[in-house]
Image (spheres, grey):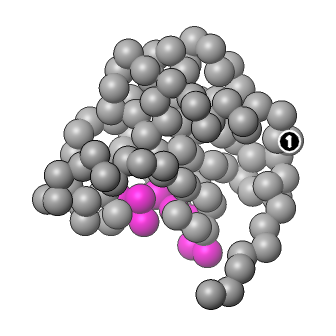
C-alpha cells in the first residue's frame, strides 16, 4: 500500500469525527497550520471538548447524517472507534457524508 506523505502543518482543515471528550483531539493543540474541528453525537462530551479544548471548533451532530459543514470543508478527516458503535444501516450513509465534506484530494 502506498503511503501518503503529508506534513500536518500543510493541512488546511482537520475533522475528528466522533471526538468525544477529546482523548485524541487534544494532541492537535500544538500543531500550527490547520484549523482543527471535532464533532460528536454526545452533546455532553462535545460540550466538554468545546469548554476545554479552545483551539478546536466543536460541533454536535445527530445520529444520522448530515454533518453541519459545507461540502469539501476538510482535507483530512479521521474517526477512531466510531463505526464500530454505529448500526449497520448507518455506516454507509456516514461514509458518504464524510466523503461529501472531504475536499477533492483529501483523506478520510
In the depicted view, which residue is nearer to us: 95 or 23?
23
The answer to whether residue 104 is magenta is: yes
In the depicted view, which residue is nearer to us: 99 or 46?
46
Residue 69 place in picture, x, y as percent: 45, 45
Q: Which residues are magenta?
A: 97-105
Q: Residue at x 26, y 36 (%)?
A: 62
Q: Residues within 10 Å of mark 1 (few under 14, many from 20)?
A: few
Could you say which quadrant of the image residue 104 lies in?
bottom right
Q: Is residue 63 left or right of residue 108?
A: left
Q: Which residue is mark 1?
A: 32
Residue 54 place in picture, x, y as percent: 68, 19
Does residue 69 appear anywhere in the picture? no
Q: Is residue 67 left or right of residue 87?
A: right
Q: Residue at x 73, y 38 (%)?
A: 28
Residue 106 place in picture, x, y as percent: 60, 68
Residue 27 in the image: above or below residue 107 = above
Q: Residue at x 58, y 67 (%)?
A: 107
Could you say which quadrant of the image residue 31 lies in?
top right
Q: Residue at x 53, y 54 (%)?
A: 78
Q: Is residue 86 left or right of residue 96?
A: left
Residue 10 place in picture, x, y as percent: 82, 58
- Give the residue furthest to the left: 89
Amino acid at each position: 500500500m502506498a503511503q501518503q506523505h503529508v506534513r500536518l502543518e500543510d493541512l488546511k482543515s482537520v475533522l475528528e469525527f466522533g471526538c468525544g471528550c477529546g482523548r485524541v483531539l487534544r494532541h492537535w493543540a500544538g500543531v500550527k497550520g490547520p484549523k482543527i474541528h471535532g464533532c460528536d453525537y454526545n452533546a455532553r462530551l462535545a460540550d466538554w471538548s468545546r469548554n476545554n479544548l479552545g483551539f478546536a471548533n466543536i460541533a454536535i451532530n445527530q445520529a444520522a447524517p448530515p454533518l453541519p459543514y459545507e461540502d469539501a470543508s476538510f482535507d483530512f478527516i479521521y474517526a477512531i472507534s466510531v463505526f464500530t458503535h454505529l448500526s449497520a444501516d448507518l455506516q454507509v450513509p456516514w461514509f458518504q457524508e464524510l466523503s461529501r465534506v472531504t475536499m477533492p484530494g483529501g483523506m478520510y
